[in-house]
Amino acid sequence: MTNRTEWGDTPKSVTHSDHSVIEPVRELTERAYTSGSAKDVDRQIQEAERNLATLKQEFPAWMASEFADMEAAWLAYQQGQPHAKTQLFRKAHDMRGQAATFGFPLAGRAADELCKLMDAIESVPLHVIEAHVQAIKVIIRDNVNIDDHPLGVQMIKELEKLGDGLIRQALRGQNNR
Amino acid sequence: MRVDFTKLRFLIIDDNTYMRKVLKALLHGFGAREVLEADDGAAGLEIFMTYSPDIVIVDWEMPILDGLEVTRMIRQPTTSVNPFAPVIMITGHSEKRRVVMAREAGVTEFLVKPISSKGLYDRILTVVAFPRPFIRTKTFFGPDRRRGAANNYTGPERRKGEDAEVIKPRALIEKARHRQ
């Protein structure tokens, strides 16, 4: 079936009329699942947290760099450059996923909204994308690194309302076709 | 019980430099020594074929080959160095249809960003300690997509030639108890 030398013996399988069930490969279990207490696990997780904390001072610069890429993709999109839409979506996806880790949870929420919109609607109005990009810009520029900043939260709620309305409208359009 | 990360070789495939740094920091913190990395899907696949890592951590959105395509190629039984390698997909996408797409591609575990050290540890623990059976059909090769027996499922058995209860993975907690 495949190069067995790479992953050990061929696992047993049971063949049925339209599928086979292959027994779980337990090689990793045998090699790396080892004795230890809950405290040992906690220690491993704490050590990982400590490692992450050492990177913390770099997070604002990383966010600024990420936003610069996003803004460049947005500019390219407005200029109609090929693949710019995919690039903008990718940057929004990155921002959606990592902004909270980097200490900018509200920027993550704004990017999340942008992703949802671009995922659901073929052509998101430019002014709506602009609103999301600007929101992220302000959050990073003003170093808003809490998730309950009153103005920031208000801004996100407005974006959510805007996005929900557009997605509902798009769905209605699809249903009426 | 715990995972001995010194015994495992990881491959991170993510086009985002910063995310790779974060993942590496977490894996090294857990105790991993061998962490390979690639900044796009094609390079990741090449490293996978050359070094046969034990666990692959892959992003979804990437240029050239995205995370789904990489996973499908890893799961090619005739060409992959290890079609059973656990693939953990880490992504900002949280929509249900995306989770289903990942599962259909053969992803073993799905972790939605923002990631936490505990979330990552738990996914790695799951693939190491509780490997799932693999299913091969005409159109699919990958980890069993049935994560548990659906007690409320009343429809017909879609897999031919076996009863629904033939593959009934026990709940993780039950398995964990069994191992203690």
Image (cartoon, helix red, strand yellow):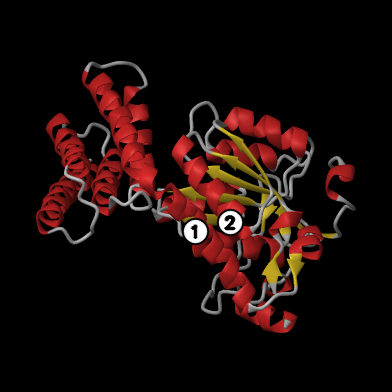
Q: How many numbered discs sit on the rendered protein?
A: 2
Q: Is residue B147 left or right of residue A160?
A: right
From the image, tell me which residue sits under label 2: B29
Write the residue at 30% across / 16% down.
A81
- Tag 1, which secondary structure? helix
Counting from the top left corner in percent of width and height, residue A23 is at 79, 62
Quadrant position of residue A122: top left
Q: Is residue A1 left or right of residue B75?
A: right
**Residues at circles 2 and 1 in contact by the CB criterion of under 8 Å:** yes
Packing grade of label 2 (10 A; few <14, some 14-19, many >=20) is: many
**From the viewer's perspective, is A107 left or right of A28?**
left
- Locate residue B69, reporting x and y percent: 58, 36
SS class, disc 2: helix
State the residue in front, B101 or B119: B119
Q: Position of residue A28 (x, y in %)?
A: 77, 59
Q: Is residue A62 left or right of residue B130?
A: left
The residue under label 1 is A50
